[in-house]
Image (cartoon, rainbow, N blue to C red):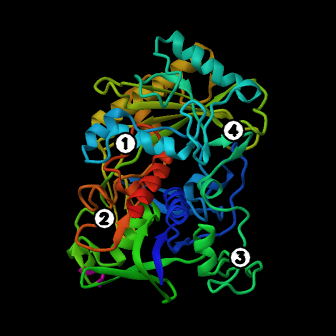
Amino acid sequence: MFDVVVVGAGSAGCALAGRLAARTGRLVLLLEAGSGELAAADVGSLAATAVGHPRNWAHPVELAPGLPAVVPRGRGVGGSGAINGAVWTYVTRADAEGWAIPGWTYPSLRYWYAIAEREPVSATEGPVPVQVPAGALLHPTAERFLTAAAALGFTEEPDKNAGGPPGAGLVPTNSRDGLRIDPARAYLPVPLPSGGLDGSTAGEAAPGHQRVWHLDPESIVESGVPVVRANSTVARVLIQHGQTFGVELAGGERIAADEVVLCAGAVGTPRILMRSGLGDAETLRSAGIDVHVDLPDVGRGWSDHPAVFLPFHADDPPPPPPAPTAQASLNWDAGADPAGDVEVLLFTRPFVAAGDLHLMCSLQQPDSRGTLDLDRISYDYLRTEYDRRRLRHAIRTAADLLRAGLGTRTEPSGAELGNDRALDAWIAAHLTTAVHLCGSAALGRVVDAELRVLGVTGLRVADTSVLPLAPRRGPAATAVAIGEKAAALLSG
């Protein structure tokens, strides 16, 4: 029997399991539905986000009514933090103040970021190095991006994580010398050996079989590291009389635990909750699931960042291999949000060989709220004129940056850019998501301030599904901070 079972070896799960085992010596089992192999370390590569790549879950979704798409989320140890753009940005003060959850203030979140980082400026000794591109790693388009933003009158934001007014600046990344320091590399011992949970003979697992780190219970406590078991999909949490007592895997195997923490991500976590009888009672009963607790907000009311990639051409040589791909961003107020509700993010490498570069234009505080259940994910993007107007504004601002010297726009055409109806049609044909889904098991609605699921003992959630709304900046660093905070809560 394990003291704690952590479900999902993504950003929060790796931080939680690694810290908890190291601090307390408790028996911690980290279960991962995907591979136990480390993802590619190249910080500049986004190849693993492509549809069909084995390192991502390709979720069929509906971005807007009648607009289907496939959205990747990280699969395997490291989760989405092992395949994303390695952008390391904090929530804004306005995000935390808007959530108004005790213990989740802006200063407290900054503390957990600091704990996670190895940042000379803040003199911390955490496992995640954070840097901005400089010297040979700084691409000429990033320099021109900042020059163009200044020419258009936008505020400079030299440190995206300083908590100042939004503006144009270089993007911090969790990388070192071209190596992506993903959550598995940061928090779990490397290399990853394999063997049996009972300390059986080490060796590589056969293809398709579970990979388990070669540690018996006694050596786990001595070494202060968690057991990591891959290719182990959790079907549901086991609950009796309101008390959690373990998990059941997809094949029927049961694993006993004093406590369970769901870190399966903002799609996986609410679905495990639902399969466990925790969710909207009427919906669960219609699916033939026994209800333990009626939690109607599981899978409801979440948000993400609608986005469109604007392609452009530049004559610069490609960045050197160690350089991050996402290098500069502009955040600003589209009219009613001083904290910055729109963003343009520069990608300095083409997504396909010899292709265009891109500016990702995204809406950081949308009106839209999504729903998901066991077989459907609906974003309901751009349902209000306010959202449509702000996304048009972001795209037109990106076009202004290009005209100010950044590069040559490939599309949309001038006729499309200058007409709202035509631009809306172009957006509909190119709409995507930033893959920043948050709020599907939210603080105050599904979990309390200490991440405990309402109405159940021994069960917590610790991933971006607990954030009431997607923050105004990318949530990758915040996912790690949630894992750090959860480890402290469980250590107490």
The residue wearing badge 3 is 194
Q: Which label's residue is closer to the chain start, 1 or 3?
A: 1
Query: Identity of the amino acid at label 2?
Result: Arg
For residue 132, which quarter of the picture?
top right
Residue depth check, mark 1 versus mark 3: number of the one nearer the observer: 1
Please give the name of the residue rendered at 37% of the width and 42% of the height, measured from the top-left corner. Answer: 108
Helix, strand or loop at label 4? It is loop
Give the answer, above or below, for where 362 lies relative to 214.
above
Q: Main secondary structure of the magenta part?
A: loop
Please give the name of the residue rendered at 49% of the width and 57% of the height, measured from the top-left corner. Answer: 12
The residue wearing badge 4 is 350
Give the answer, above or below, for where 144 lies relative to 182.
above
Asked if the residue at tag 3 contacts the one at tag 1, i.e. Cβ–Cβ closer than 8 Å, the answer is no
The residue wearing badge 2 is 452
458 with respect to 32 (left or right): left
Q: Can residue 183 be seen? A: yes
The residue closer to the viewer here, 111 or 143, is 111
Q: Which label's residue is closer to the chain start, 1 or 2?
A: 1
Asked if the residue at tag 1 contacts the one at tag 4, i.e. Cβ–Cβ closer than 8 Å, the answer is no
Residue at the extreme front of the image, as rendered:
222
Quarter occupied by the C terminus = bottom left
Residue depth check, mark 4 versus mark 1: number of the one nearer the observer: 1
The residue closer to the viewer here, 303 or 10, is 10
Query: Identity of the amino acid at label 4?
Result: Pro
The residue wearing badge 1 is 108
291 with respect to 199 (left or right): left
Query: Identity of the amino acid at label 1?
Result: Ser
Please give the name of the residue rendered at 47% of the width and 65% of the height, measured from the top-left corner. Answer: 264
Helix, strand or loop at label 2? It is loop
Gap in angstroms between the C-alphas marked 1 and 3? 37 Å
Q: Which label's residue is closer to the chain start, 2 or 4?
A: 4
